[in-house]
Amino acid sequence: MMWYFLMSDSFTFGAFLISYGTIRFSQNYWPSPSYVFNTFPGAGEANLPLAFVSLMTFILIMSSVTMVLAVHEGHHGNRKGVVKWMAWTIFGGLCFLSCQAWEWNHLITGEHATLIDGKIELFGQTMRHNPWGPRVEDQAVMLDALRNSSHETLVNLVHEHNHSLGEAQLNAISNDKLAGMLNLQELHVTRPGPVAFGGYFFGITGFHGFHVFSGVVINVIMLLMAQTGVFERRGHYLMIEKAGLYWHFVDLVWVFVFLCFYLV
Amino acid sequence: MEHGVAEVTIHHEPSSSTKRIWKVFWILLIITMVELGLGLSLYALSLPEGLRMHLIKGVIIILSLAKAYYIVSVFMHLGDEIRNMIMTIVVPLMLFIWFILAFLGDGNSYKNLRNKYDPYYKERTTVGPKADSIATKPGGKD
């Protein structure tokens, strides 16, 4: 029965991903994943495309392996082995969830200079705004935009590149002078990208993350049942196998999420 | 080190199965690394939209399908089930082939129609200096 549940679940994920693909194919421009996902916790502004998501993928594959090993131990009725490998699997799942939490937080709270309505505003990647449009190359347009931008935006922009002055000092400087302090070549201003990107990204990775979360909960229950000897009394570890199927399915879905959002 | 312990505790059992698991793990890891390499090469070469880029993306997709095959058949042991059971799972999934082709084609034709009948849309959404001078509004319907 587990297999038929997984089949129906794969139709759900498939429908989401195909819907994403349809919208993506209907757009002239789509942000490059190497550019959107290029940060790593603790690495500051360093440009490390896809590094963090590779780590997440590795964690999930690794936890899939520990799950198979737990199932394998179950076949031999080895309680200690099952408990050990289940614990590692849960650990892997929690690591993955923490990584995803960091990634989401970083995307939402990030501040990227975006050209909107002839002025520059700072936006993160949310459901309503996508700061990953094509880069603005025309310097005259940028100068115009800087003239129209708010004082707060300019202070933030200058502060990003120039740490010698405190925010209080920058606040006292007039807009024109602040704009003059910015190096146009260095300034990375983009136009807004397709809004659908945020909805699909957060929707699908969120749905997958929820699967990981429920998988972790199921695994914790299985661990406790194995620990207290429920399966030993039952004489078989079939439940571990079923939890394993679910967990591998979560890994399998990630293969395709990884493919659709990060690789192509 | 944890793995070493495992080898010791299960030494009385045939180790062929664990060997197979680790072998598949290495296969998955290597495929993922190749995929990443290709994904990054797309970024590093910044290829224009064209045959070569689609070729690389096609290879990445095929590698992902290979990964899916290994996970399903070895980790999930579907390969060990009876044939009829496998068929009841795999045949309905064949619907995806048609599903994907139909929908992606639909999206593509929507793009072409919009570009053809709404030149302003095309200018606004393609890369270039012309687009820069058109003021863009936050939150479109797309």
Image: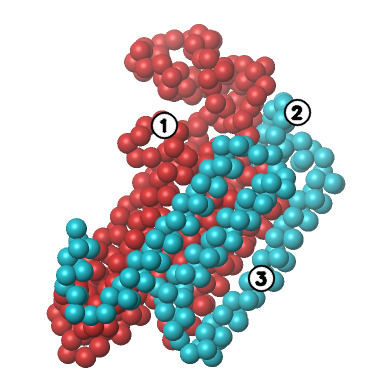
Chain colours: A red, B cyan
Q: Are marks 1 and 3 on the same chain?
A: no
Q: Are marks 3 and 2 in contact (CB under 8 Å)?
A: no
Toward the viewer: B114 or A253? A253
Residue under numbered circle 2: B130
Q: Are marks 1 and 3 in contact (CB under 8 Å)?
A: no
Q: Earlier in the sequence, mark 3 or mark 2?
A: 3
Can the viewer see residue A170 in this picture?
Answer: yes
Residue A91: where, in percent of width, then height?
26, 60
- In the picture provided, is A233 more to the left or to the right than A111? left
Residue under numbered circle 1: A46
Question: For the residues marked 2 and 1, what is the alpha-carbon distance in whole angstroms?
Answer: 31 Å
- Above or below residue A23? Residue A44 is above
Residue under numbered circle 3: B97
Chain that bears disc 3: B
Mark 2: which amino acid? Lys
Residue A99: where, in percent of width, then height?
35, 50
User: For the point 53% across and 20% down, which residue is it?
Assistant: A186
Mark 1: which amino acid? Ala
